[in-house]
Image (cartoon, rainbow, N blue to C red):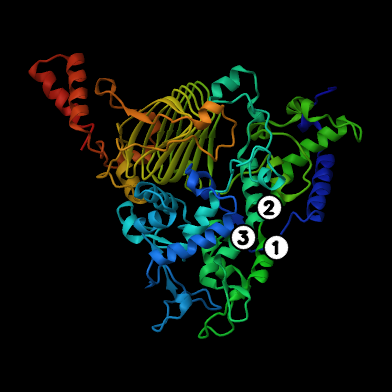
Amino acid sequence: MGDRTPVANFPRFMRSQSMSALTKSSRSLGLTREPPWLHVRREPFEYGTLPIPSLMHSDVLASLMTLRGKLLSQAPPSLTSCTSSWSLSNTTNLVCAPSTPSVSEITRRVSITGIAAALELTEEYAQLILETLASTLNDEGTIVDRLASSLVNEIESVGADIDDLLLYLYLQTYRRAPSRPHRDASSVADVWPCTSAIDGILPASTLLKVRLAGVSRRLMPTQAEEEGHQLKYVRKHLRSLLTILSETNKEGLEVITPERFERLGFFLRAKNARMESVPLSQAAPLFAGADPHVPVLPVALTQVLEWVQHHLCAASESQWDTILTRDEKSLAKVRRMFPPGKIPSSQAEVNMMDVMTPSVLATSRDVQAPTAPDDALSSSKDWRPENLTFIDGVIRSSVSKGENDIKGGSVKVSYCQDSVVYVLAPLKYASVFGCSDSIVVLGAVGKAVRVEHCERVQIIVPTARICVANCRESIFYLGVNLRPLFTGDSLNLQVAPYNTFYPKLEAHLAQVGVDARINKWDCVLTLGLANLHDAFKRSAHAATSQIVGASLLPTDKFAMFTIPSWSIPDSDSMHHTSANPFILPQLYIAAVEQRHLAVFGSSTTHRHKSKAFILSSMC
């Protein structure tokens, strides 16, 4: 490929010229937008899809409009409180609804029984839908639905707002499995990736087979590509999503009220010029009334659609000039090495890794000139998802992260092998993807955990909810408030009660709302078919066969896990959690005690030591 001189050896003025040229190019392509920025929330896509076949519809909008009538019949009207209804003015203050409510100030919520009846599902599935919706609703800002902030034992009594539920059901079309063997263009557009370098290589979701087959990890879909696809999905379906939230006025015009427009916050979050989250209805000048004492009138759907399309962008687009900096340096080097029109093909791009700086290599992927906002999102080396911390590619090592290391309350542990990863921090969301032969210890997770495409791992986590998909030969030590969900092509999975603690565990549990008195680790819920939303190609057997969930870990295999002191920050050591706050079942206590006695003997002194050890391992 010719000389491979380090980028740092190129003259500074040449790199700055390239940066300036590409920045101007990005602006000419419309890559910069004015605030407020509307960013797609990744949480519904990553933690909200469920492989329930009856939620899939060929004509989703018509089906949901029909379903609305069924849900309304199951949900008698009730006046909303200040937590779920809003009266907005042209100021930043929110006030309660006036004493005499209008039609728009009446909400309808539906219970598990109503959801089951309307969707013709069992109450078990209806409860799963409600719990999943609760874990993915937006709980940031001053306008939050009651379900989003409910504790797990309150979810059933609060129920779901019908608009939120319909948007959630629409989300189930994401990564839809085509119902016909010959896919038309519109169906293919919803299935990502349509064609992939790993098709046929990953039939049973085992990443180890991919590595053995010699397929480079860089060919796997990246987080940037995933979120780029989510942005495209919202753009494509935006009109349908707004139609669900609209109503028809006396003139027959489709209009949207500010209260119902706020429900679009399930998919979008608004950021102002200071990158602060603001309510959608306050960010949109369409709903700004001239008189704070006069109710804001509904706005035509077409006007709302135009405004959202204008402000909808990738999270990284908001600061595009910063993002392009290192890419431009790499592109400048590549363009110097090759004459115009002679840039290597995609098959040769792997050699271009040699000309990148180490910081660029750390986030890795193909070097491409930005051609559109979505493409730029996927190609930028300095791109980082909003509010997400990566622990990526740890091999034969141990890594510890504390509160100061986690930005945004979400973490993704990916592609770790033969390693131990400690994330001792309070989290909203956590995902573990593509790891093998590793132990992952997570702090308290208040919303949801997702473990996917892992082999021979041990996951130790206290959380409100966990979903395990396409994993093999792994053990999950759980302190979980809701039934753990197992789905996909899984094999030889086991569950056990939570088995460790660290000094700030109880403080973190209280901070994120996980109740240590409730542990449903052994109430496994298994969905009968492989995940219909899975982007990876599966074998015919895996796609149609009944899957096996998880079995209980035999008591003689259970052991307490001790977190080493070096992985605990010094500032945390002053806190008082000195025992496992989740109560162990009696059979597991006896097994631990028996093993401890077998090691240290049966004398009176050793029995006292064994008893002390057991007490230090549980409350």
- Among the 4 quarters of the image, the one containing residue 465: top left
Alpha-carbon span between mark 2 and mark 3 = 25 Å
Amino acid type shown at disc 1: His
Circles 1 and 3: CB distance less than 8 Å? no
Crowd tier of the residue under label 1, counting other residues whose Cα lies within 10 Å: few below 14, some 14–19, many 20 or above: some
Instruction: Please count the marks in the image.
Output: 3
513, above or below 360, in the image: below
- The answer to whether 325 appears left or right of 392 in the picture is right
Name which residue lies at 33% across and 56% down.
Answer: 156
Amino acid type shown at disc 3: Ser
468, above or below 233, in the image: above
Q: For residue 210, which numbered disc appears in the image?
A: none
Please name whichever residue, 560 or 11, is drawn nearer the observer in this view of the structure: 560
Crowd tier of the residue under label 2, counting other residues whose Cα lies within 10 Å: few below 14, some 14–19, many 20 or above: many
Q: Position of residue 386 (x, y in %)?
A: 57, 49
Residue wearing tag 2: 317
Residue wearing tag 3: 240
At numbered mark 3, what does the secondary structure look like: helix, strand or loop?
Answer: helix
Amino acid type shown at disc 2: Glu
Please name whichever residue, 231 or 599, is drawn nearer the observer in this view of the structure: 231
Q: For residue 310, which numbered disc appears in the image?
A: 1
211, above or below 528, in the image: above
Q: Please report whichever mark, 1 or 3, sits nearer to the chain's N-terminal start.
A: 3
